[in-house]
């Protein structure tokens, strides 16, 4: 029983899309710390973002379960460890239930609302937009809202500059590109849609390069005008 519980726990942890979820948690914590958040406030930021990211990963795997199983995608932990959709339902509900109060505790009403809307945007990606030409939009919206969450978590009087919001949006679109690229070949063979699939690998990488240049230019501008 203990071994089975460890297997389920490992599967659920990996099903959060753990590398991406961990990167988002560390990115948000680092940004919040740089804006001046310290102590217990960082702990609430961690809890809010970790629960939000977990819910996003689990909903994604819940919705993709039948397709992943049919294609024998053993790199997906739900398939590899033999979990069913029912095993994800309770964790999803709990993660969403924890995310809401922790978001408000971390960043007040406006900042907390921004984080809740960012998670909601990501869930719209899972539910409706993942396989459409608009698949980039939830990433852009969610990352833009996260910039508000981060600044508000540091001070309720602090709001991100327009440059910071544009940087966050650009990072979100780049994240979407590199999240989709590893599966682009199998998705194309399966006739699955999506923004990156419609662009193709070369044009998607070119767009990522342009956005990276934009980010660099805005960072230089912020440094020169500080």
Image (tube, rainbow, N blue to C red):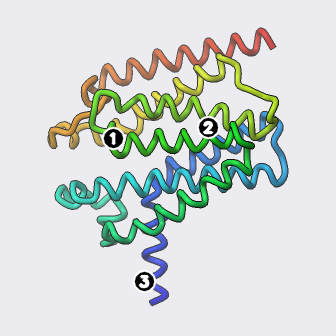
Local crowd at mark 2 within 10 Å, few (<14), some, or many (≥20)? many
Q: Which mark is residue 4?
A: 3
Q: Residue, x 60% and y 60% (percent of image)?
A: 98
Q: Is 128 situated left or right of 159 in this image?
A: left
4 in relation to 33, above or below: below
Q: Nearer the viewer, residue 154 or 217?
A: 154
Distance between mark 2 and mark 3 Cα atoms: 38 Å
Q: Are the residues flagged by discs 1 and 2 in contact, CB closer than 8 Å?
A: no
Q: Which residue is mark 2?
A: 114
Q: Residue, x 22% and y 38% (percent of image)?
A: 185
Distance between mark 1 and mark 2 Cα atoms: 30 Å
Q: Is 156 situated left or right of 164 in this image?
A: right
Q: Residue furthest bottom?
A: 1
The N terminus - image quarter? bottom left
Q: At which x and y percent is residue 197?
A: 26, 31
Q: Residue, x 42% and y 34% (percent of image)?
A: 176
Q: Which residue is mark 1?
A: 182
Local crowd at mark 1 within 10 Å, few (<14), some, or many (≥20)? few
Q: At which x and y percent is residue 59?
A: 40, 55
């Amino acid at each position: 029983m203990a071994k089975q519980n460890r297997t389920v726990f490992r599967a659920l942890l990996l099903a959060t899309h753990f590398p991406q979820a961990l990167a988002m948690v560390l990115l948000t914590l680092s940004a919040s710390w740089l804006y001046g958040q310290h102590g217990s406030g960082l702990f609430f930021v961690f809890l809010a973002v970790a629960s939000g990211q977990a819910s996003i990963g689990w909903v994604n795997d819940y919705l993709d379960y039948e397709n992943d199983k049919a294609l024998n995608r053993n790199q997906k932990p739900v398939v590899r460890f033999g979990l069913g959709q029912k095993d994800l339902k309770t964790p999803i509900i709990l993660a969403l239930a924890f995310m809401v109060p922790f978001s408000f505790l971390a960043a007040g009403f406006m900042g907390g609302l921004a984080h809740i809307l960012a998670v909601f945007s990501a869930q719209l990606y899972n539910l409706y937009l993942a396989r459409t030409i608009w698949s980039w939009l939830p990433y852009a919206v969610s990352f833009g809202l996260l910039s508000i969450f981060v600044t508000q978590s540091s001070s309720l009087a602090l709001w991100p500059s327009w440059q910071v919001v544009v940087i966050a949006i650009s990072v979100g679109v780049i994240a979407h590109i590199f999240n989709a690229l590893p599966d682009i070949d199998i998705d194309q063979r399966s006739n699955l849609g999506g923004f990156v699939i419609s662009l193709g690998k070369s044009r998607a990488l070119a767009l990522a390069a342009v956005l990276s240049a934009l980010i660099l230019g805005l960072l230089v501008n912020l440094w020169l005008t500080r």
